[in-house]
Amino acid sequence: MMAGQAPRSRRNFTRHSLHLGTPVQYLKGVGPRRAALLKAVGVETVEDLLNYIPRRYLDRSSVTSIAKLRSNVQATVVGKVETFGFQKGRTTRFVVILSDGTGFLNCTWFHGLEYLPKVFHVGDTVVVSGPVTFYRGKQMAHPEFEILSGTDHELIHTGRVVPLYASTADLKRARLDSRGMRRIVKPALDRLGATIPETLPSTILESNGLVARWQAYQNVHFPENMETAREARRRLAFEELFFLELSLALRRSRRRQKSDGIVFEKANGLIQRLLKELSFQLTSAQKKVLHEIRADMKSRRQMNRLLQGDVGSGKTVVALITMLIAVENGYQAALMAPTEILAEQHHLTLRGLLDKLGVQVTLLVGGMKKSLREQALLSIESGRAQVVIGTHALIQETVSFERLGLVVIDEQHRFGVIQRATLRRKGICPDVLVMTATPIPRSLAMTIYGDLDVSILGQLPPGRIPVKTRWLDDRKREDVYRFLDAQMSQGRQVYVVCPLVEQSEKLDLKAAKEMATRLAKEVFPQWRVALIHGRMPSAEKERVMQGFCDHHIDLLVSTTVVEVGVDVPNASVMLIEHAERYGLSQLHQLRGRVGRGKHQAYCTLLANYPLSEDAKLRLRSLCETNDGFRIAEADLRLRGPGEIFGTRQHGLPELKVADLIEDVSLLRVARQDAFATVEKDPELSDPDHGPLRSTLQMRYRRKMELADVG
Ligand code: ADP
Ligand code: MG
């Protein structure tokens, strides 16, 4: 942003005016070129620079002498460069030989050959970290490295802690490796000293044992010891999470002060009649959740609630009852699902019940015939359709509702924020219930889903037998087929989910078709085998789904379209081909298709070797537990929140210090404190809260606009 600005303005940033907002370009030793490189890693201002916290530290206790190195162990070594150069072989490598007085260590690189020779000098003191192997002497391949200056070297040997920063090749080339970073950060911190303004009220600092902000910045970059470094980082992570939560708390409070929601007074006749039609009693968890929903709908506030419940916990009937409340009060209700198959299945199951109650239900999905579609649009527009079930076809321009009062979104984690917001705008402030089966830690869920209120369906319907999960080598295929045959002989039904092929729907489809043909003709000629996939015309899909529900089909071959929501209690086996290619949550969702009835159910994972370590971890986790909460945590650890909840999805600002997984307990406290603060002082008008207000305004002005549509 500032890189191209005329140097004239440099005068504005004199010694006294250095502050957090100062562009880094005006720091001593930075200049336009380095400023541009720093910008690429998100550092534009002095504040950004201070938030570019060390990735790790080097303290004396973590350094091993070369003599004591053991094979196959990660180690950190400090040594002097004796010599370096290229070694030709099958592939050329760059080698640096270090010594530390106790022995020699060969460090080798196969990449970066063009810039590495420029980085090292004979006599430099270098710190390297990496895995040690013994191969023609002691060796480290592709170690992480830092070149230490004379003073660093002393620091290490006097027991100080040296910060190491993440550094890209570009930064290194511009001599902005850890040493370069320290040279910029240190004088900036020295000049700022205690002038770095505090952002948190003293009560919050005290109750959480947090150090002052200026101290935290000093200590996170130049700590006395590892303990002060940890405390400093904790303070900065807390601050980041606190402001995130504060902005959510404010939005929620503003929403709750508004009273433009629909008041749904009546909630009796239809629901009583429905309960009589159901073949089961609601669980106490379902009743509790419905109670919360009911209270929202009755109030003048617009409902904005997340219903979280593991696969099979019975969310659909909760959605149905919620929709009946809207219908009973003369409004239309819409249920949006992420796939056509799921929308069609909801339509199938709900229509049966709604017909008996005399409630009009209409399906609207993309793959419908034109005439049917027009009919559907008409009945939605005229208000004749009281309940509308569909996919994102519901949010297209051409769809207009007569009197939309409630929107339910199923499997909401599959939709983007923007899609959700579009649907919501179709009604005049309709109430919204979003449902998800991805049970992540509560505080994390509440953060990712912004300012939603959360209800938890923490109990499965009674009598469920846990699914038995096995993981087998593909070579055991014959045994697996014998097992499927036995299950079908006992009157059960089977899903076979086909391999995911390289993100290509076309190839997936081909694999599924081949599998279906082979199973039908060669393996199970005596059973009724059918195929279902996302590209089928809607009517065809509905026919197959209905056939499977009615047990006119024994074995259903499918692409991953059955992943979410499909409910056929008599199905007892889920066979997943190439299970190693799926993510953990996806596997759990697939498994959730079985174990919904009174029979023992099985999930069989066929995997093709060799498997990556990650794949093994995924399959092992799945076999170990049926608990969606634990699965989600493992998944979160394996993939990280970034990949699971893409930014587009959750609209959260990027965190620089805190980590949504590692710091989840810190998140909980920060959230509590932030919400309590807003509860007491909704306008943040208390003089003690002045810094909170101004910090929020500065930090979130841009980012919150995106999050606002959530
Ligand atoms: P999910 O939460 O995964 O959407 P569903 O709503 O599809 O779960 O419900 C799973 C199965 O459990 C369905 O067959 C449904 O009819 C059944 N079910 C729901 N609630 C109950 C209950 N209280 N008692 C018994 N079975 C129930
Ligand atoms: Mg469901």
Image (cartoon, helix red, strand yellow):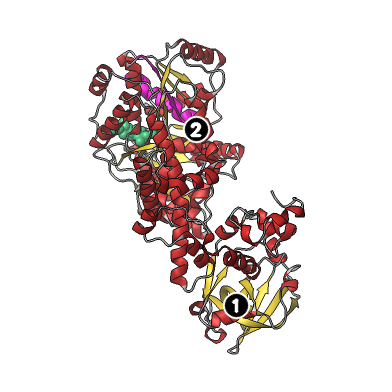
In this view of the protein, can residue 456 be seen by the observer?
yes
Q: Is residue 331 magenta?
A: yes
Q: Which residue is mark 2?
A: 531
Q: Residue at x 50, y 35 (%)?
A: 708
* Residue 549 coordinates in the image, percent (x, y): 38, 28
Q: Is residue 98 magenta?
A: no
Q: Label 1 CB, ligand 1: below 8 Å? A: no
Q: What stretch of residues is rendered in magenta? A: 330-353
Q: Nearer the viewer, residue 228 or 139?
A: 228
Q: Which residue is mark 1?
A: 152
SS for dot 2: strand
The disc label shown at residue 334, or none: none
* Residue 492 coordinates in the image, percent (x, y): 34, 36
| Quadrant in the rendering for residue 387 | top left
Q: Nearer the viewer, residue 476 or 139?
A: 139
Q: Residues within 10 Å of mark 2 (few under 14, many from 20)?
A: many
* Residue 26 coordinates in the image, percent (x, y): 69, 58
| Amino acid type at image mark 2 | Leu
| Amino acid type at image mark 1 | Asp
SS for dot 1: helix
Q: CA distance from mark 1 to mark 2?
A: 66 Å
In this view of the protein, can residue 554 be seen by the observer?
no
* Residue 88 coordinates in the image, percent (x, y): 76, 75
Q: From the viewer's perspective, is 453 left or right of 65?
A: left
